[in-house]
Amino acid sequence: MAIARSYNFTYMTARTIDHPREAAAAVRDGALLIDIRSESQRAEDGVVPGAVFVARNVLEWRCDPTSEHRDARIDGRERQLIIMCNEGYQSSLAAATLHDLGLTRTTDLAGGFQAWRAAGLPVER
């Protein structure tokens, strides 16, 4: 029997990175960029080199260090995580949820992938 997890959302605790160049610098310094865009958005617009793709509907399970379904590449207790969606809306809520799981070094990228691309940062097709 599975026990439902209770989430207490604290939206103001998750810090947002306001400029894509700040996110790119954080990635160069060791942060992990997690792309939660749909596969169709990724296919149409391209991907950020080195970003880890995690579907939004499984993000919490992949990032939660206590989950048996976690992704071993994601260590959000030690490493800064930057959540990126298409335009910066979904990622704000996702980052707040990860904060509630104890991953307090999680942030999101304002403007999402579209801001990244508009800033002229690397994109692969």
Image: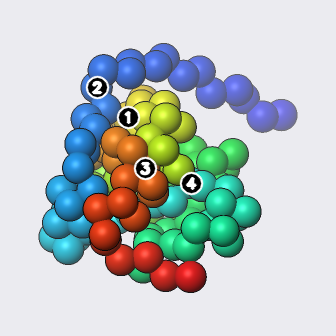
Camera-nearest label, 4 or 1: 4
Judged from the image, the secondary structure of the residue bearing numbered disc 3 is helix
Q: Which mark is residue 13?
A: 2
Dot 4: within a 10 Å radius of its alpha carbon, few (fewer than 14), some, or many (20 or more) residues?
A: many
Sooner in the amino-acid sequence: mark 3 or mark 2: 2
Residue at screen point 35% across, 47% down: 109
Dot 2: within a 10 Å radius of its alpha carbon, few (fewer than 14), some, or many (20 or more) residues?
A: some
Sooner in the amino-acid sequence: mark 3 or mark 1: 1
In space, the residues marked 2 and 4 are separated at their CA atoms by: 20 Å
In space, the residues marked 4 and 3 are separated at their CA atoms by: 10 Å
Judged from the image, the secondary structure of the residue bearing numbered disc 2 is helix
Camera-nearest label, 4 or 3: 3
Residue type beneath disc 2: Thr
Tell me the residue that label 4 is attached to.
36
In space, the residues marked 2 and 1 are separated at their CA atoms by: 7 Å
Camera-nearest label, 2 or 4: 4
Dot 3: within a 10 Å radius of its alpha carbon, few (fewer than 14), some, or many (20 or more) residues?
A: many
Residue type beneath disc 3: Gly
For residue 60, side relative to residue 21 (left or right): right
Residue type beneath disc 1: His
113 over 103 or under it: above or below: below
Quadrant location of residue 101? top left
Q: Is residue 64 visible?
A: no
Q: Are marks 2 and 1 in contact (CB under 8 Å)?
A: yes
Q: Which mark is residue 112?
A: 3
Camera-nearest label, 3 or 1: 3
Sooner in the amino-acid sequence: mark 2 or mark 1: 2
Q: Are marks 3 and 2 in contact (CB under 8 Å)?
A: no
34 over 104 or under it: above or below: below
Residue at screen point 63% across, 48% down: 56
Residue at screen point 17% across, 66% down: 25
